[in-house]
Image (cartoon, grey):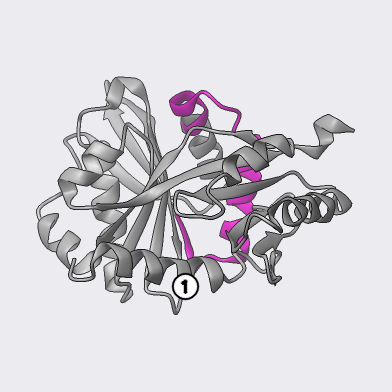
Amino acid sequence: MDTDHEELLALLDSRMRRGAEPGTPAARIERTPAVVRQSGPDSVWNGIVWSALDAAGADEAIAEQVRHYTALGQDFEWTLYGHDRPADLADRLTAAGFTPEEPETLMVAGLADLTRRMAGTGEPAGIELREVTDAAGVAQVVAVHEEAFGTDGTRLGRRIQAQLAESPDTFKVHLAVAHHEGREIPVSAARMELHPGTGFAGLWGGGTLAAWRGRGVYRALVAHRARIAAGLGYEYLRVDASDQSRPILERLGFAVLTTMTPYQYEHRSRS
């Protein structure tokens, strides 16, 4: 990747955060002096994409976002990046009633280099990659997600179904199916969001059932989506990596840019 760390981070901030566009037709992006946020119904992700806060105005800006989403009747997420300011923003969010989830690592790879390195990467023996296009496939993706991550996938399923219906050209979902002992077993699922005009495509999900980890399934899904994005002219892939996927991605040539921690505000539990 020719662009150095600081330039690439600034590019991502400019194109993907400050310049964010709605994820689906049902979503809307709103820009205030303090934040860029996405709002919409349950079928879309609601949350803060970017912020430019200082110590003097941070608490009121946070309170305003809580009022905004509470008025909409929506829980929401404040995605906190490691370089966001002020330095104590995490503490301020917690004090305002947000709950942090596990931090992730923001990683980026240049697609030209990545596709060269992964040119020979195909599906492991017995594994077939399928694109998901219907409700039955979404149900399989949700089942894999719930078993792989141990979390409820009901809301995720609704959002995937809505995005497939509303944005089929920019939202792709793939399922890895194992042909094992005469059966077809969904063993991994992954998503990709394409952001026209930004040069960036984002990889999401990538959950693999425990019994099938370490067999190259996740790597094959990364390579498959990278080839699709490169073929469409995208320059970079971004991943919000877990501790499990980060070592794999580093070996593939993804660079660490910063950390990011989702802070959740659930107003319904406070009613």
In the figure, 204 relative to 108: above or below?
above
Q: Residue at x 71, y 64 (%)?
A: 26
Is residue 195 visible to us here? no
- The secondary element bearing badge 1 is classed as helix
Residue at mark 1 = 14
Q: Residue at x 67, y 65 (%)?
A: 34
Q: Residue at x 31, y 76 (%)?
A: 233
- Residue type for callout 1: Ser
What range is drawn magenta here? 145-172
Q: Would residue 103 appear left or right of 51 to someone viewing this image?
A: left
x, y percent for residue 237: 33, 60
Secondary structure mostly seen in the magenta stretch: helix
As for residue 193 lying within the magenta part, the answer is: no
Q: Residue at x 18, y 60 (%)?
A: 114
Of residues 50 and 91, the one drawn nearer to the viewer in this rendering: 91
x, y percent for residue 119: 12, 58
Name the quarter where the N terminus is drawn. bottom left
In the figure, 13 relative to 253: above or below?
below
Of residues 103 and 143, the one drawn nearer to the viewer in this rendering: 103
Name the quarter where the C terminus is drawn. top right
Q: Would residue 258 appear left or right of 58 to someone viewing this image?
A: left
Furthest residue to the front? 56
x, y percent for residue 143: 52, 30
Q: Quadrant of residue 94?
A: top right
Of residues 266 and 209, the one drawn nearer to the viewer in this rendering: 266
Is residue 185 visible to us here? yes
Furthest residue to the bottom? 197
As for residue 153 lying within the magenta part, the answer is: yes
Disc 1 crowd, CA 10 A, few/some/many (<14, 14-19, 20+)? some
Labels in figure, total: 1
